[in-house]
Image (spheres, grey):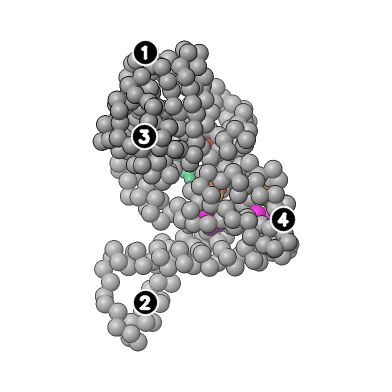
């Protein structure tokens, strides 16, 4: 049937990588030539020697009921198809209340499918796989036992799914999730265009950070700079996608989130209080046209981003003081919610 599998994966904490590797293992056992490539390391030439005998597998996590920005950008940049078939797999967080409760990938997988179909790719499968949740700056981590259960169930499901796909069948799932995603589209768009810039600016390194630089080296989108002359510390840029890799793989559990500041930034961004104060004060002094709702909402977000940028830089400097750093560490929920990474994934495998 197929002769070659090219697996492009985007992963933060290893879930999507694990799912991609289950499919790759199955393909190897069926004697396919297999290549696994992280999305950020994609080289356009890699697709030149592929044809209708090739199946391309794209795996990525769900972020805010859609695909992460890097994955959308990646598929948009892919060349036009030469008959290749594509299997699309979104991973999502299962087991929220009951251990078998599915997560919701929303519009993510079908959006990627649509972009590729428009380029002429033949989409043979669209599915979502439940894995443990990894958004540790927002939600607590499950127990090891519950994570193992979710991974075990998904392993069996992916084995059966890949058997079908690699034997030439087509499988399309996730219609209910897609409908939920459509209803929640404003939320996903708000995350893609604004929310994803706020959250990473909440990350900081606590007093256990040794300045080893692993977080900067392993970030899939190069969003961490090591700053400082003698004692270098990580500084998070706006390009961070909140994939949680730095939080999960830091050898000292030193990455935390400033939850106090997050609440403050959300207050400014969502209520528009400060924007209103500035706008009303300036209006009698300089000529500003009346703003409609859209313009004032965009202005509010820009103001909140500016606030976030400045406070984050100030906090980066303040956090060098041990006492202040401890204050933020112990008021951070990350400190109490634990950190998740896919248990079998080593950081070296996904660099
Ligand atoms: C910023 C962010 C947003 C997320 N949004 C969703 C979501 O909308 N629905 C869902 O089911 N899981 C969501 N998750 C959970 C991840 O999609 C899930 O744990 C995934 O398997 C992580 O894969 P990775 O380890 O390959 O990054 C989110 C995780 C993060 C970090
Ligand atoms: S946060 Fe962790 S990985 Fe990053 S430099 Fe500090 S100790 Fe190293
Ligand atoms: S800075 Fe951390 S959370 Fe952000 S994209 Fe890089 S590794 Fe992921």
Mark 4 to mark 1 CA distance (whole Å): 55 Å
List x then y, in percent, for residue 262. 52, 58
Q: Residue at x 61, y 42 (%)?
A: 248
Asked whether mark 2 and ligand 1 are closer than 8 Å, the reply comes as no
Number of residues whose C-alpha sits closer than 10 Å to that of mark 1, classed few (under 14), some (14–19) or many (20 or more): few
Secondary structure beneath dot 2 equals helix
If you read the primary sequence from the N terminus, does the residue marked by circle 3 or circle 1 appear first? 1
Give the vertical position of 122 relative to 277 (above or below). Answer: above
Q: Which residues are magenta?
A: 200-207
Secondary structure beneath dot 4 equals loop
Please identify the quarter of the rendering in which residue 105 is found: top left
Q: Which mark is residue 279?
A: 2
If you read the primary sequence from the N terminus, does the residue marked by circle 2 or circle 1 appear first? 1
Q: Is residue 16 magenta?
A: no
Please identify the quarter of the rendering in which residue 50 is found: top left
Mark 3 to mark 2 CA distance (whole Å): 41 Å
Depth check, mark 4 against mark 1: the one in front is 1
Q: Which mark is residue 109?
A: 3
If you read the primary sequence from the N terminus, does the residue marked by circle 3 or circle 2 appear first? 3
Contact between marks 3 and 1 (CB within 8 A): the answer is no
Contact between marks 2 and 1 (CB within 8 A): the answer is no
Please indicate whether residue 132 sits to the left or right of residue 117 in the image: right
Mark 3 to mark 1 CA distance (whole Å): 25 Å
Depth check, mark 3 against mark 2: the one in front is 3
Q: Which mark is residue 1?
A: 1
Q: Residue at x 34, y 24 (%)?
A: 51
Q: Which mark is residue 66?
A: none
Contact between marks 4 and 2 (CB within 8 A): the answer is no
**Can residue 335 be seen from the camera position used here?**
no
Number of residues whose C-alpha sits closer than 10 Å to that of mark 2, classed few (under 14), some (14–19) or many (20 or more): some
């Amino acid at each position: 049937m197929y002769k070659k599998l090219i697996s492009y994966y985007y992963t933060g904490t290893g879930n999507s990588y694990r799912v991609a590797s289950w499919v790759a293992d199955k393909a190897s056992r069926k004697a396919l030539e297999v290549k696994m490539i992280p999305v950020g390391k994609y080289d356009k030439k890699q697709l030149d020697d592929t044809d209708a005998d090739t199946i391309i597998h794209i795996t990525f996590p769900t972020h805010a009921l859609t695909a992460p920005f890097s994955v959308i950008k990646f598929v948009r940049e892919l060349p036009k198809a030469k008959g290749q078939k594509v299997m699309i797999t979104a991973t999502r967080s299962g087991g929220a209340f009951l251990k078998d409760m599915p997560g919701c990938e929303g519009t993510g997988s079908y959006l990627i499918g649509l972009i590729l179909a428009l380029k002429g790719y033949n989409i043979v499968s669209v599915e979502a796989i439940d894995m443990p949740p990894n958004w540790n700056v927002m939600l607590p981590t499950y127990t090891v036992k519950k994570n193992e259960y979710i991974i075990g169930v998904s392993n069996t499901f992916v084995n059966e799914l890949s058997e079908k796909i690699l034997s030439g069948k087509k499988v399309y799932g996730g219609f209910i999730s897609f409908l939920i995603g459509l209803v929640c589209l404003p939320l996903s768009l708000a995350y893609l265009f604004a929310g994803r810039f706020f959250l990473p600016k909440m990350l900081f390194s606590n007093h256990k950070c040794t300045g080893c630089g692993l977080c900067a080296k392993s970030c899939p989108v190069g969003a961490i700079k090591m700053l400082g002359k003698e004692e270098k510390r990580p500084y998070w840029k706006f390009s961070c996608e909140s994939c949680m890799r730095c939080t999960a793989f830091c050898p000292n559990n030193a990455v935390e989130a400033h939850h106090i500041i997050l609440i403050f930034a959300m207050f400014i961004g969502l209520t528009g209080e400060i924007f209103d104060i500035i706008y009303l004060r300036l209006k009698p002094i300089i000529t500003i046209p009346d703003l409609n709702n859209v313009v004032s909402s965009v202005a509010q977000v820009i103001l909140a981003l500016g606030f976030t940028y400045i406070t984050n830089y100030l906090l980066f400097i303040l956090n060098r003081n041990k006492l202040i750093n401890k204050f933020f560490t112990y008021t951070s929920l990350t400190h109490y919610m634990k950190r998740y990474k896919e248990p079998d994934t080593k950081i070296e495998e996904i660099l």
